[in-house]
Amino acid sequence: MSDVKKFLYVNRKAPYGTIYALESLEVVLIGAAFEQDVALAFLDDGVFQLTKGQNTDGIGVKNFSPTFRALGDYDVQKLYVERESLEERGLSEDDLIEVVYEDEDDDWEEKPAIKVVSRAEMADVMADADVVLSF
Amino acid sequence: MKIGVLVSEGPYTHEAADTAYKFVTAALAAGHEVPRVFFYHDGVNVATRLSVPPQDERNIQQNWSALAKEHGVDLVVCIAAAQRRGMLDANEAERQGKDAHNIAEGFRISGLGQLIEMGIQTDRLVTFGD
């Protein structure tokens, strides 16, 4: 396919409190059907979207975090998380859910989709993208 | 250049829909193509034809509708975001059993695929929002 573009979905906001995170994920799921090169970036409060053990019972809003684990099935293989954003919030990689994808170039071996990167590396990820959608 | 535009904040509360309108007007005047504008999140509320701002204020919906008519810009409102917020066209109102619809002339309701397609088919995608 000649016109494959690099789509980057940038998630900067907490999963609840505003609808941006949920509606961003809805775009990602639809966009996955278009056979483009897809990556997600999580920074600022957006890193909370991937934290383990979310429980929304108290706020009457659907907990959509399990959907992130299904992203591998949609062939979404790159979830970049900014290390500095984690550290500034007292979080580490251990606090994040596991998201895996099956690598078709490596006998369908399950591999982690989440990659923790530095702020400088995140800048490179953004510079490298053709289409950046920021939520 | 072919430019796609995403509006992701609601009218009047936020300046995004105004700035996007001015940007599209300027881009067209400079000879660029703007084939489509996609309205998402609270941006879908721009498309209501029931908005009645005071007479000495700009009418954001009418500005966009006029732009669509004059320049053939495709104004697409995300269906999932629209339904959450009570934005329905005649077809959707009937399908959902609602007694009213409110999508203004020049806007159409469609899926998120239209946003992705816009990203693929344009040279630049410019977002107006927070």
Image (tube, coloured by chain):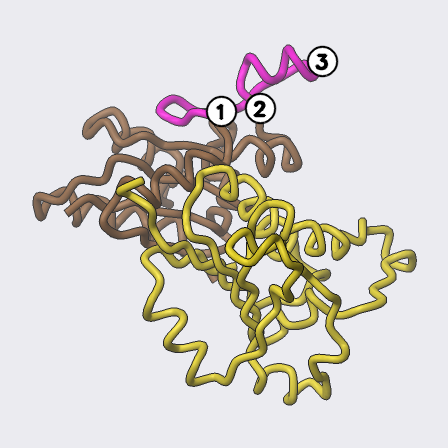
Please report the residue visible at 19 percent of the width from the left and 30 percent of the height from the top. B71
**Residue found at the far left of this picture:** B31
Residue B26 in magenta stretch = no
* Residue identifier under label 3: B97
Q: Which residues are magenta?
A: B89-108
Expressed as whole percent of the image width and height from the top left, the position of residue A1 reads: 31, 40
Q: Residue at x 69, y 80 (%)?
A: A93
Chain A drawing hue: yellow
Figure quadrant of residue A49: bottom right
User: Residue B122, can we see it?
Assistant: yes
Mark 3 or mark 1, earlier in chain: 3
Q: Can you give x and y, in whole percent of width and height, for residue A124 in the image?
A: 37, 76
- The disc placed on residue B88 is 2
- Please, which chain is the residue tagged with disc 3 on? B
Pointer 3 with pointer 1, Cβ within 8 A: no
| Frontmost residue, B88 versus A70 | A70
Q: Find the distance from the CA under tag 3 to the CA under tag 2.
A: 11 Å
Q: Give the residue at mark 1.
A: B103
Identified at 73% across, 72% down, the residue is A96
Q: Is residue A37 left or right of residue B91?
A: left
Residue type beneath disc 2: Leu
Left or right, A54 with respect to B122, comes to: right
